[in-house]
Amino acid sequence: MSKFRVHEIAKKLGMTSAELVIKLEELGFEDKKAVSMLDESEIKVVAAAIREEAAKKDAPVPGGKAALPKPAAPTPAPAAKPVMPKAAPKAAVKAVPVAAKPVAVPVVKTVPVKPAVVEPKYVKVSEIKAKAAAKAAAAIKAKAEAVKPEKKAVVKPVVKKPVKVKEPIKIKEPVVVVEEIPEVEEVEKEVVIEVPKIETEVKPPAPVIPEGPKPVFKVTEVTTVAELANKLKIPVSELIKKIMSMGMMVTINQKLDKDSITLVAAEFNYDVEFVSIFNEEVKEEEVVDVSKLEWRPPVVTVMGHVDHGKTSLLDAIRETNVTAGEAGGITQHIGAYKVKTPKGEIVFLDTPGHEAFTAMRARGASVTDIVILVVAADDGVMPQTIEAIDHAKAAKVPIIVAMNKMDKPTANPERLKQELSKYDLVPEDWGGKTIFAPVSAKKKEGIENLLAMILLESEMLELKAVKEGMAKGVVLEAKLDKGKGSVTTVLIEKGTLKVGDAFVAGFFYGKVKAMMDDKGTKLTEVIPPTPVELLGSNGVPNAGDTFQVMVNEKEARAVSVRRNELQREINIQKQKHISLEGLYTEIQDGKLKDLKIILKGDVQGSVDALTDALEKLGNEKVKVSIIHRGVGNINESDVMLASASNAIVIGFSVSVSQAVTDLARKESVDLKLFKIIYEITDSVKAAMEGLLEPILKEVVIGKAEIKQLIKIPDGFIAGSHVSEGKITRQSLVRIKRAGEVVGQGKITSLRRFKDDVKEVLAGFECGISVENFKDMQVGDIFEAYIIEKTFAKL
């Protein structure tokens, strides 16, 4: 069932959004706004209600006594009724050939009538009714018959005006049709609908089949009223009036949020496409001549489950030992390498294998041409294997399966093929399209065949790039180096990058001071698709940010400043300000706890991935708030921020000076350093569980039966026999009578032979008194229990 927004329906009904919202509230539709959706059944209800209301407004027309021009028409109608039965049949037949005879009859009868002045009004109304009858092809009997002679009477005075002569001619055709159709009641319904804005009422269902696509314009999430008016190609004053009519007070330079822009655009029949602030300022280059496109090497991403041998396979391909330097056997950040083979070059991206780096893996798939899915032949499909398949499919990238560890005796490639075929990765020898390459990274077997398959796949993809013009690419990684400053790893996608070029990368800008490849060799210029480390950025951009060479450093700086301003405005709009009512609701609903963290890492990609992993640990009771994150060592500023906001400081692959450690101890700030990703998530998870309310569990420890009631000044002591377990002085008791609880409370006195004791075991007798309970009877059962607290788990 199709749905439409309230403001769209209002436009079709000829109403404002505010008027329709008020009408919806009257009809019982609660919490409806201009952007709310209504289905077809609801639209019919609203249209029917508006139709009824319009009919009531026009109800005086058939028999009213109002003095307005429209209601004046019905007044002569009753006088004409007795005349019509005689004149109508003859007049209808002779209307076309002889127009003079019927004209004289009504004139003679109406002239002696005193209100002779009414005739001009009477004539105009008859014309209006005639038009309505022509459109609807019907009229009420009394009205229709009354209209016929009036039309003839109108003919003579109207003949003087050439414009109106045409109208009676058009009217005569439907007049004959009216005589042929005796069923005037159905016609009446049509007339009633036609008179009160039929065009606006019949059109709500019309949007079901749009005539064509709406025009689309592109804006950022933060756009001023003036900028929006320019996009809509209308005067600013007109746009401000429209926005104010929608209930928003704005000025020409005021920023509009995403929802407001969408709503305003819909009012002017536009669709909006929100673009990143990184794409708005940099002008798109002109379409390049196809003749300038040249073949380029493929960009290959290596993906797979942890410990299935991704880095080992890449190491075997590069014939260098990088695996030993990875802490815990897990790749800690994205690396990019260019490998030369006898048949051509291949660029490899090494994505982290741990599941915490899902976000980084997705970024790797977004810049790649081919995915190498590494699966251990002895282990089969694992959770991260499925993740990698999903990311590759989402990026619409072809997959080549590398069946690793084929040298092991437990390797079972056929089982692996069967498992992967469930995920639409059917091998070529089974009639599918997926290439399966058996390899052994340890013994370096099958490597050449895998490289040949990669190059074969790249030939089918016909990968080409423009090597002329200003360079453009993607930031793969960025980090701070003590001696070099900001080091940015960039994959150039088109154009040529040279030393000295001004560039903008994300929110930062700079000038290329030096470039190195993955082996540390200095380069003066780079063509696509080459991964390089470059120096010169004034900050650390995020992995995945666009890298664009600008005309000069001044222009690059202007773009960077503009982006930072826009991002600051977006952040301000997204800030949530809590009210006292909201705070009370949070406390009452779930006593929401917040674990605040300051996160520092060695590279930006690791920080992003950790942020994503830690924020996913939260639930409806406890949430993780990363109040600050950055690249580099932990400093005194981080510790002071943690002290002020009651946060913990977590460092990943970074160091801490003795002065910072002493300050953290002095300020009682919890400072933790880690080298392995999953140790951080485990530690934070344990801290979050400590914030949860403990689970209270009731444990019954014993039962005792009252055998005798002993009178004391303050009441009674129950002489009891412990039948099960034990009764302790600290326990709580329930008093049961005939299986039903009649009271409960805390033990105030537990005695044995006039001595106060801490506990009485089963088989012994004792005296028990309970706080605030005096109605004890012989035969009652004391059920003693304690409340145990257990730590809640996430």
Image (cartoon, helix red, strand yellow):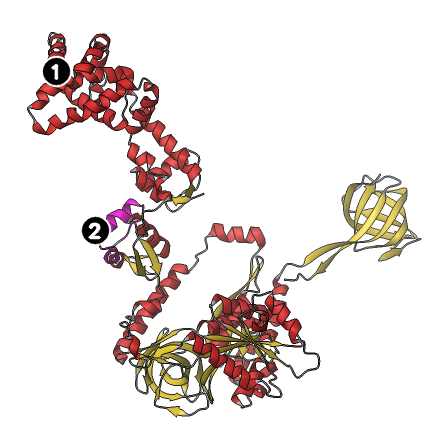
- Which span is picked out in magenta? 229-250
Looking at numbered disc 2 in the image, what kind of residue is underneath it?
Answer: Ser
Q: Quadrant of residue 19 in the image?
A: top left
In x, y percent, where is residue 668?
56, 74
Q: Distance between the residues labelled 2 and 1?
A: 59 Å
Dot placed on the residue nearer the N-terminal end, 2 or 1: 1
Residue 634 in view of the camera: no
Predominant SS along the magenta part: helix
Which residue is denoted by mark 2 in the rendering? 237
Residue 223 in view of the camera: yes
- Residue 289 lies, with reference to residue 197, above or below; the image says below
Looking at numbered disc 1 in the image, what kind of residue is underneath it?
Answer: Val
- Left or right position of 279 against 134: right
In x, y percent, where is residue 584?
52, 51
- Residue 162 lies, with reference to residue 742, above or below; the image says above
| Element type at mark 1 | loop
Which residue is denoted by mark 1 in the rendering? 98
Residue at left offset 36%, top offset 84%: 527
Residue 57, magenta (yes or no): no
